[in-house]
């Protein structure tokens, strides 16, 4: 029986068969989540004041 392994150009030998490197996948996911969190944080900081001023200006026109 021949052992099955995969090789990642960045991380080297991986035990078992992997179509994609699980370490690279985790790193990519972490980068995407960090980028998403930065965008959401910026949006959260700018949006409430915009919504508040928009809703109060329309609320006065009854």
Image (cartoon, grey):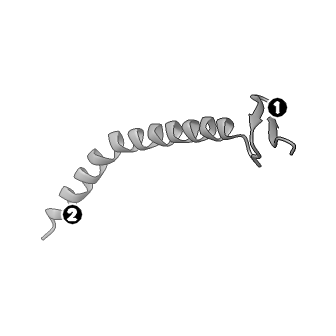
The quadrant of the image that shows the N terminus is top right
The number of numbered discs placed on residues in the rendered structure image is: 2
The quadrant of the image that shows the C terminus is bottom left
> In the image, is residue 39 above or below residue 57?
above
- Which residue extends farthest top? 11
Secondary structure category for the residue under label 2: helix
Q: Residue at x 42, y 44 (%)?
A: 40
Q: Check disc 2 and report the residue beneath it.
A: 58
Question: Which is nearer the N-term, disc 2 or disc 1?
Answer: 1
Taking depth in this image into account, of 58 and 49 the one nearest to the observer is 49
- Which residue extends farthest front? 1
> In the image, is residue 39 above or below residue 59?
above
Q: Residue at x 26, y 56 (%)?
A: 54
Dot 2 crowding, Cα within 10 Å, few <14, some 14–19, many 20+:
few
Image x and y of residue 33, in percent: 51, 41
Taking depth in this image into account, of 31 and 53 the one nearest to the observer is 31
Image x and y of residue 15, in percent: 74, 37
Tell whether label 1 touches label 2 (CB within 8 Å). Answer: no
Please give the label number shown on residue 9: 1
Please give the label number shown on residue 37: none
Secondary structure category for the residue under label 1: loop
Q: Is residue 2 left or right of residue 49?
A: right
Image x and y of residue 58, in percent: 21, 63
Q: Is residue 35 left or right of residue 13?
A: left
Q: Residue at x 58, y 42 (%)?
A: 29
Q: Residue at x 46, y 37 (%)?
A: 38
Residue 43 falls in image quadrant: top left
Image x and y of residue 35, in percent: 53, 38
Q: Is residue 33 left or right of residue 3?
A: left
Taking depth in this image into account, of 36 and 50 the one nearest to the observer is 36
Dot 1 crowding, Cα within 10 Å, few <14, some 14–19, many 20+:
few
3D distance between C-alphas at marks 2 and 1 = 58 Å
């Amino acid at each position: 029986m021949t052992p099955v392994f995969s090789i990642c150009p960045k991380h080297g030998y991986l035990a078992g068969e992997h179509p994609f490197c699980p370490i690279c996948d985790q790193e990519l996911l972490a980068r995407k989540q960090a980028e998403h969190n930065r965008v959401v944080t910026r949006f959260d900081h700018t949006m409430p004041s915009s919504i508040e001023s928009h809703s109060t200006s329309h609320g006065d026109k009854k």
